[in-house]
Image (cartoon, helix red, strand yellow):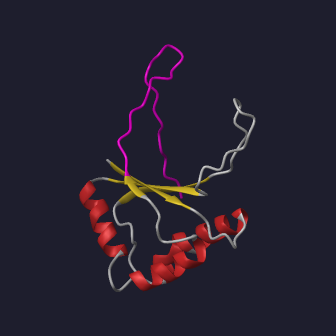
Amino acid sequence: MFKQICFFKKNPAMSLDAFMDYYENQHSQLSKRMGKSPSIPNATRYVRRYLKPEKNPVTGEIHDPGYDCIMEIWWKSREDFENSQKIIGSQERLPAVMADEAILFASHANPVCSVVEYDSPMGPNGEATHVELKYED
């Protein structure tokens, strides 16, 4: 399994609610609206995590995390990830992607990272925990 994380700042002219609405109902559906094949072929999961800062229990302050959204995508392999990046960056799609991102994000300078994960055992007796995904209609 290969995982990508991207960090996004919203366009400062948008409220967080407007940003979330546009991302969920427009940007995440861009390939579909363009009548194109998926830009994330062979992805097994595509998640947006919107950040709402909370009070730090040590300082009592609310600290700006620097980003409004963390986007995560899982693929079966690094090759699937790299193929997706080629599709998104193709001359056929890039102008539409950049125009849509100009509406949504503060800039195109959004960090893209691959991830190495380690899980700590959190079960009541120190056993490993797991998450099961179910796909429903």
Question: Which of the pair 17/46 is nearer the observer?
Answer: 17
Q: In this view, does 75 lie above or below 131?
A: below
In the image, what residue occupies the spot 65% across and 50% down?
Answer: 64
Dominant secondary structure (helix, strand or loop) of the stretch shown in magenta? loop
Q: In which quarter of the image is residue 105?
A: bottom right
How far across and down, in percent of the image, does residue 3 sit?
A: 37, 51
Disc tally is 0
Q: Quadrant of the C terminus?
A: bottom right
How far across and down, in percent of the image, does residue 104 sit?
A: 59, 73
Q: In this view, does 65 lie to the left or right of 46?
A: right
Q: In this view, does 61 lie to the left or right of 82?
A: right
Q: In this view, does 66 lie above or below 84?
A: above
Q: What stretch is highlighted in magenta?
A: 114-137
Q: In this view, does 88 lie above or below 57?
A: below
How far across and down, in percent of the image, does residue 136 sit?
A: 52, 54
The residue furthest top is 125
Question: Which of the pair 102/22 is nearer the observer?
Answer: 102
In the image, what residue occupies the spot 54% across and 16% down?
Answer: 124
How far across and down, in percent of the image, does residue 52 sit?
A: 68, 50
In the image, what residue occupies the spot 50% across and 23% down?
Answer: 122
Is 8 within the magenta?
A: no
The residue furthest right is 60
In the image, what residue occupies the spot 47% across and 64% down?
Answer: 110
